[in-house]
Amino acid sequence: MGSPFYSFLRQNNIVCLKFFLIVLFMGCISHRTTNHCSNQLIATPTTPTHLDVTSALEALSLDGYFSFNNNNHAAKDFGNTYQFLPLAVLHPKSVSDISSMVKLIFDMGSTSELTVAARGHGHSLQGQAQAHRGVVINMESLMGPQMQVHAGEQPFVDVSGGELWINILHETLKHGLAPKSWTDYLHLTVGGTLSYAGISGQAFRHGPQINNVYQLQVVTGKGEVRMCSKSKNPDLFYGVLGGLGQFGIITQARISLEPAPKMVKWIRVLYSDFSAFSKDQEYLIESENSFDYIEGFVIINRTGLLNNWRSSFNPKDPMQASQFDSDGKTLYCLEMAKYFNPDETNVIDQITESLLLELHYIPSTLFLSEVSYVQFLDRVHVSELKLRANGLWDVPHPWMNLLVPKSKIHEFADEVFGNILRDNINGPILMYPVNKTKWNNNTSMVTPDEDVFYLVALLSSAVSSKATDGLEHILKQNKRILEYCARADLGVKQYLPHYKTQGDWRAHFGPRWKVFAQRKSSYDPLAILAPGQRIFEKGRPILCNVLKGQGVGEVFYG
Ligand code: FAD
């Protein structure tokens, strides 16, 4: 038979007659070469109308439901600058809801413009979880009480792709366990962060979150439900991890766990010398028995900095700390954490002290705090609540995340912090190194070509329309930084990448573009999935998409 349309009908004997007729009609208008339709339809193919598509979706037999109205929330995200209204939002209750909907759209063929975006918690920055006139899947409605923790030598938890990391933390803690690698903010979904990497201060040791997954269940762009792991369908497994949602919708993930500590010693120190700061960060990520979390941030022209810290940290030497004046300087804060249980306090104090003795920070700026493990991991949520209370959470967020090779970080810092950014950016500037030797290089994630590279995250909020902190100004500043990186040939890669042309995507992936495009043609050949990433275009065969810049032989035969 060959036609995806016929195989679809064979496998879905639960479909009702109404659905059969609608799909039959749509199959006729969308598949130019199927010979079970009238000649007239074959000769003059038309695109399914809005009404046809809506009726076909409505006719699907689902455990969940579609909403066709009041879907404005699905056209919004944390970035707050891109807004594409979908035709429908699917609120799935089962994996088969997702697979039958994707399969229906796949069977409509390439003449239908319909695309599908999985939406986790909608914390994308530039519309990546949106689908213009397509279907958005509200992945959080897949969540349920089915989270399952397995203790043992290699503990793990099975979770839904729409589960929030904060819920996983609370559930696994009931078993004295927790995931190893985190993001700074936990109100993000598993599918959302695994589509990028999931990087935080634990990544130097455990790699990003995509390194800490044993198995995935995925719905491909053909609507097939497939299990994958490093030994079963490894190409799909590694493709999906860091794959920007291009190859499948993550419906389940098996996340690796470790024994969870109860408490965290949380430490901040300041540097005025960038070399000393970065040298100490690099020393710590390479040391045996180091801290459990290492991050850092850059502070440009801020007043009263240490006073702000006092609400959550205590200065080691209050006298000296009160004499420190941060005003006007560019400073670098090294942030570290050591996990412990209450019965280990003495040993941990000694380890921490001996690690601090090796560092070169300004002595008066040592600040310490002890908090519970949950308070530490969920720290950004506290800021979220404060910002929300002041109406500052739902503003545009022109964030830019860069991965900078270690050998170029001084050059980068000189230009960016010494020249381009003259003032604080209305948001944190994170900066910390990670050790790529701890990362798995088979995933789709693209990193610089060096073993150690820095994450530099410019997390601006556009809180006004003023020339100095308005959206336009920040976007211009970001552009200047990107142009500088390209001009100086620093080998920088974007994290949470955003590009407007396929040429830029090809440059981003470099030699790995070939594999990325091959995977797209295997798992989502009609380019239905994650259209908001703007990498491939529906209606244009993947081969054609690829050929824009490369020869067929090069693409398919290496
Ligand atoms: P969404 O925005 O809903 O989706 C993101 C992309 O993934 C879209 O393309 C979408 O189609 C796709 N997608 C969503 N779910 C699935 C699925 N189940 N299967 C396949 N594809 C899917 N990132 C870090 O690495 N480290 C951090 O410390 C960090 N901190 C952050 C703090 C804040 C306050 C915010 C807003 C973001 C932060 N991020 C961080 C970025 C964050 O990881 C990404 O924005 C992530 O995509 C957000 O997850 P989400 O669930 O909201 O995904």
Image (tube, rainbow, N blue to C red):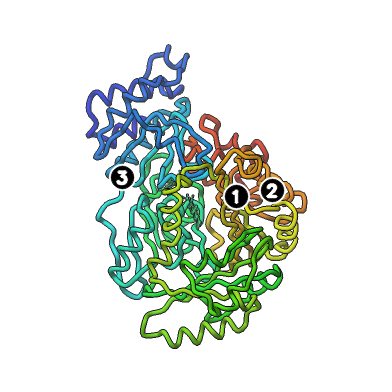
Percent from the top left, x then y, of residue 9?
Answer: 30, 31
Pointers 2 and 1 in contact (C-beta within 8 Å): yes
| Left or right position of 173 against 212 | left
Cβ of mark 1 under 8 Å from ligand 1: the answer is: no
Q: Which residue is mark 3?
A: 141
Front position in the image: 298 or 540 = 298
Badge 3, how many Cα within 10 Å: few under 14, some, many 20+? some
| Left or right position of 93 against 138 | left
Badge 2, how many Cα within 10 Å: few under 14, some, many 20+? some
Front position in the image: 123 or 306 = 306
Mark 2 and mark 3 lie on one chain; the one further toward the N terminus is 3
Percent from the top left, x then y, of residue 296?
Answer: 58, 66
- The residue sitting at 48% across, 73% down in the picture is 266
In this view, 106 is above or below 263: above
Instruction: Find numbered disc 1 in the image and state the secondary structure of the residue it sits on.
Output: strand
Instruction: Find numbered disc 3 in the image and state the secondary structure of the residue it sits on.
Output: helix
Which of the 4 image quadrants contains residue 36? top left
